[in-house]
Amino acid sequence: MKILFATPECAPFVKTGGLGDVSASLPATLAGLGHDVHLLMPAYRGMKVSGEIGDGVELPPWGPWPAAQLVPVKIDSGVTLLLLACPSLYQRPGGPYVDASGRDYHDNALRFGLLARVAAQLGTVHSPLKGWTADVVHANDWPCGLAPLYLAQSRMISPQEPTAASVLTIHNLAFQGVFPMDSAEVLGIPHHWRGMEGVEFWGQLSMLKAGIQYADAITTVSPTYAREIQTPAHGVGFDGILRARSSRLRGILNGIDTRLWDPASDPLLPYHFSRDELQGKASCKTALQARVGLPTDRNAMLLAVVSRLTPQKGIDLVLGRCRASWPRACSSWCWDRASRACSRR
């Protein structure tokens, strides 16, 4: 099967969270199963990529988008990396979504609209890659959310032509790609798809909603999350939309790449351990206690949180407990012993 994996980030090239890890491991696993996998992502400033570089494919300007180029790179995982090179949109200081000062780029609708459009094009007879057309386009999160819509549009305009099936994976429902509705005109979204049954979300355009509405299948990161996001408490305003599309929604538990995440060989651990030999785990615990200024007690319960500092991840609850239990429950990373206060307040 020919699979296009469209993503705004992929480790180790660009990563802001779990999507970057999944984008690295899942396509590689699919390639290992014998599938022909291409991974499409923007060519951001400062990316370091190694592999066999093929001939670039010119993409002419279209609508509001300038000319661009697809640069194929055969990387070690067996996946063909397709770098979408468009310097005016992607060669900028800052991150994938924000500028150097941490503000969203003002033209993110255009930047990721182009990514979605090219992804969809690779799933039609108009694929810019000679001899390669995707059977399935796998779009990830809001930056690729318009790809299923564009594929549905192609299927509607030319029903006699083969068109790839579309899959949308929701990694984090809280990020919804919301832009002014006048962006729909620029992005080429038909008028009859701009209402509540289409891309409209509280008077604005949501790229994530577009993906949910028009994808052939919707997946998310676990069965539990699939259930949670269909409830008002965790649906972030999308619970009704997801319930309406529940027949297409599946939760598939995220896995890990055990070649990288293996405590028996991880070079970043001071001591190694495995499920059969756990002595090194206790030594790692002692080393961590010493590093963060806690008493080195092998019998003490040690809890750690690896997370972005945002209420969505519950970090406010962690810090609230930290303040309530000082200084016994606080480690040196957040406890300022000189001022006897939590320095992360």
Image (tube, rainbow, N blue to C red):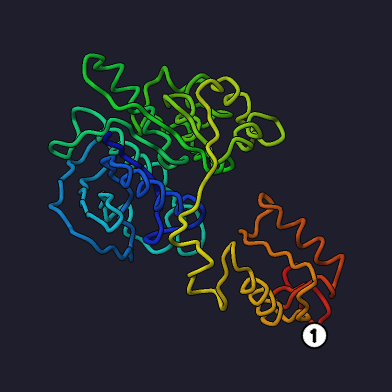
Asked if residue 112 is positioned above or below residue 185 in the image, the reply reads: below
Which quarter of the image is occupied by the N terminus?
Answer: top left
Which quarter of the image is occupied by the C terminus?
Answer: bottom right
**Residue 331 as seen in the image, left or right of residue 199:** right
Image quarter for residue 124? top left
Foreground: 88 or 44? 44
Residue drawn where x is 45% and y is 27% of the image? 217
Residue drawn where x is 42% and y is 17% of the image? 192
The residue that mark 1 highlights is 338
Residue drawn where x is 43% and y is 41% of the image? 140
Mark 1, other Cα within 10 Å: few <14 / some 14–19 / many ≥20: few
Furthest toward the front, the residue is 276
User: Label 1's element?
Assistant: loop
Asked if residue 47 is positioned above or below residue 272 in the image, the reply reads: above
**Residue 264 as seen in the image, left or right of residue 68:** right
Foreground: 121 or 166? 166
**Residue 17 as seen in the image, left or right of residue 115:** right
**Residue 13 as seen in the image, left or right of residue 295:** left
Instruction: Tell me where residue 298 appears, x and y as whole percent.
Output: 76, 75
Instruction: Tell me where residue 211 appears, x and y as whole percent.
Output: 45, 31
Amino acid type shown at disc 1: Ala
